[in-house]
Each structure stands twice: as structure tokens, then as C-alpha cells.
């Protein structure tokens, strides 16, 4: 009996020992912890204002068009002129803004457009001239500008000024002709002039007989000044000391004479203004011919 009890107790101890011995869990396999990556923030998309047109990717705000229309209306009223209809005013205003935007596009492309710092300095200068920035804001309001609209207009104006300087600089190397003219409403007078010229008499001396005030002197001018391309071609085909044949222009008979030609000569004030106007017109037409313009 005792032997049976001992065997039973020994068996129980084995069972208890088996239950209390801890089981060792398998060691976890080491894995590389992924490096944290930064999610790039999206680039802010510039807010496009309600627009009237797009010129080479540059937007013309409807606000700027409305401002320009009102300014044209005010100008006509101040001059005592009949105020055109809204459609006419908007078309004129839009064309003005397209040309201004072409100047801005070219200035940015050339690196000549004003920076934000340039515009800030210009605005501060205007504040100083007017006595305060409140005075400038009052002027802006009277001329239908918001602050943002005025800043855009100032940028276009500054860019246009920079581009005008670039365009006008090319005129310094323009060839100019010094031209004299003899004219009469009677063909017979010019036939007599030709006869005397063939005799070797000076054109400039003969011209004094037909115009005692100017002596027939048309001064110096480059190409692009005369109203007629055909006439200009005839004159600029001459060498110094040569004259044209008798030319009838609007019922008046003329002979033109080239006394001198020169490159790099400073232009007379009136001629310079005409040459600059022509150069700007030609430049704008060239830009428009290649521009991508979308009217919205």
C-alpha cells in the first residue's frame, strides 16, 4: 500500500514539474525599420483672376479692363467729346491692355521687368511725392484703381518704359538723308528747273527761288517718316548730289534732292518723335504677328 502511494506521489510531482517549467518563446527575427520619408508639399497654384484675355500666357484681369474703360470715358468727358458706346470703349481698352501686356511679356523675357522690390520702392516714392500713402490711395480711387490693380498697371507701365528704351536705342544707328525739295503746281516750272540743273546750277540755290523761307530744306530724316513708301524708296535710292525725276503728288509737281547722308547722327526733335512712333508701331505689329492671344 505504501509502495503504491509513493509511486502515485512521484507521478504527481512529475506532472506538476512539467506544468511549471517555462517554455522559451522563439527569438523574433530582426527587420530593418524603414526610414521616414517626407511627403512633398504641392506647389501653390497661383490664383488666376477673372480675365478678359490671355497674351502669351499672361492674364488680363477683367478688373483692369473695367478700369481702363472708365478712364477712357472720363478722358472723353473732360475733353468735352462725345463719349463712345461701351462696346467701342471696351474694344479700345482691350487693345491698349494687349499692347501693354506684350511690352510686359518682352520685358520679362529680356530680364527688364520690375521686381516686387522695384514696385514697392516706386509706390513708396509716389507716397512720398503725394505726402502720404493715404493720398496715393485717394488718387487711386479717383482713377478707378484698386491697390492690386494699380500695382499691375504700374508693372505694365514700367515694363513698357524699359522696352521703349531698348527699341529707341536701335534708332541711333539709323541712316539719315538730308533732303531738299523744289515744288510747283505747274509742270512747266519743274521742266525749267530740270533744264537749269542740267546746266550745272546748284539745286540748293534754285530751291531758294521757290521757297524763300526754308530754301526747300526738308532737313534730315530716316526711313519710315514719309507718308509714301514709294516716294521714300525713290529718295533713299539716291546718292548724295543726285535728284529724282519730276514726281506728281496729289496734283503738285516735285523734285527731291539728296545733299548728304549720315549714320549715327542725332535726329531733330520732331523727326525723332515720328521715328520713335514708327519704331514702336512696327515693333508692336511684329509682336502681335507671333503672339498667342486669346480673348476670353
Image: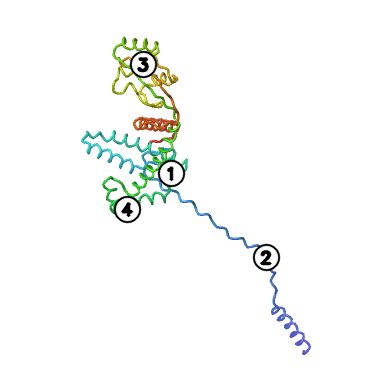
Identify the residue position indicated by label 4 in the image: 128
The answer to which of marks 2 and 1 sits earlier in the sequence is 2
**Of labels 4 and 2, the one closer to you:** 4
Q: How is the image coloured?
A: rainbow
Q: Earlier in the sequence, mark 3 or mark 4?
A: 4
Q: Is residue 56 above or below residue 249?
A: below
Q: Which residue is mark 2?
A: 30
Q: CA distance from mark 3 to mark 1?
A: 48 Å
Q: Which residue is mark 3?
A: 255
Q: In the rendering, at what x and y percent does residue 220 appear?
A: 38, 26
For the residues labelled 3 and 2, say whether their Cβ atoms are less than 8 Å apart: no
Q: Position of residue 187 (x, y in %)?
A: 31, 11
Question: Alpha-carbon neighbours of circle 1 within 10 Å: few (<14), some, or many (≥20)?
Answer: many
- Name the residue at 71% across, 78% down: 21
Mark 1 vs mark 4, foreground winner is: 4
Under tag 3, what secondary structure? strand
> Residue 287: x and y, percent?
43, 33
Amino acid at each position: 500500500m505504501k509502495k503504491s502511494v509513493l509511486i502515485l506521489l512521484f507521478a504527481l510531482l512529475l506532472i506538476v514539474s512539467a506544468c511549471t517549467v517555462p517554455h522559451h518563446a522563439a527569438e523574433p527575427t530582426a527587420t530593418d525599420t524603414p526610414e521616414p520619408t517626407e511627403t512633398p508639399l504641392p506647389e501653390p497654384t497661383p490664383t488666376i483672376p477673372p480675365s478678359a484675355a490671355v497674351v502669351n500666357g499672361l492674364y488680363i484681369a477683367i478688373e483692369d479692363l473695367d478700369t481702363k474703360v472708365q478712364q477712357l470715358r472720363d478722358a472723353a468727358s473732360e475733353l468735352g467729346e462725345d463719349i463712345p458706346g461701351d462696346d467701342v470703349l471696351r474694344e479700345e481698352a482691350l487693345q491698349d491692355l494687349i499692347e501693354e501686356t506684350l511690352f510686359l511679356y518682352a520685358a520679362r523675357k529680356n530680364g527688364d521687368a520690375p521686381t516686387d522690390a522695384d514696385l514697392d520702392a516706386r509706390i513708396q516714392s509716389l507716397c512720398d511725392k503725394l505726402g502720404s500713402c493715404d493720398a496715393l490711395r485717394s488718387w487711386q480711387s479717383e482713377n478707378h484703381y484698386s491697390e492690386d490693380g494699380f500695382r499691375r498697371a504700374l508693372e505694365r507701365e514700367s515694363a513698357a518704359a524699359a522696352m521703349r528704351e531698348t527699341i529707341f536705342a536701335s534708332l541711333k544707328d539709323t541712316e539719315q538723308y538730308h533732303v531738299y525739295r523744289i515744288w510747283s503746281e505747274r509742270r512747266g516750272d519743274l521742266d525749267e528747273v530740270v533744264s537749269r540743273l542740267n546746266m550745272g546750277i546748284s539745286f540748293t540755290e534754285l530751291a531758294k527761288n521757290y521757297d524763300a523761307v526754308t530754301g526747300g530744306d526738308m532737313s534730315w530724316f530716316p526711313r519710315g517718316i514719309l507718308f509714301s513708301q514709294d516716294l521714300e524708296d525713290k529718295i533713299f535710292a539716291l546718292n548724295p548730289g543726285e535728284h529724282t525725276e519730276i514726281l506728281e503728288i496729289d496734283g503738285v509737281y516735285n523734285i527731291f534732292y539728296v545733299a548728304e547722308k549720315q549714320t549715327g547722327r542725332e535726329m531733330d526733335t520732331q523727326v525723332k518723335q515720328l521715328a520713335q512712333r514708327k519704331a514702336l508701331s512696327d515693333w508692336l505689329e511684329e509682336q502681335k504677328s507671333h503672339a498667342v492671344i486669346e480673348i476670353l
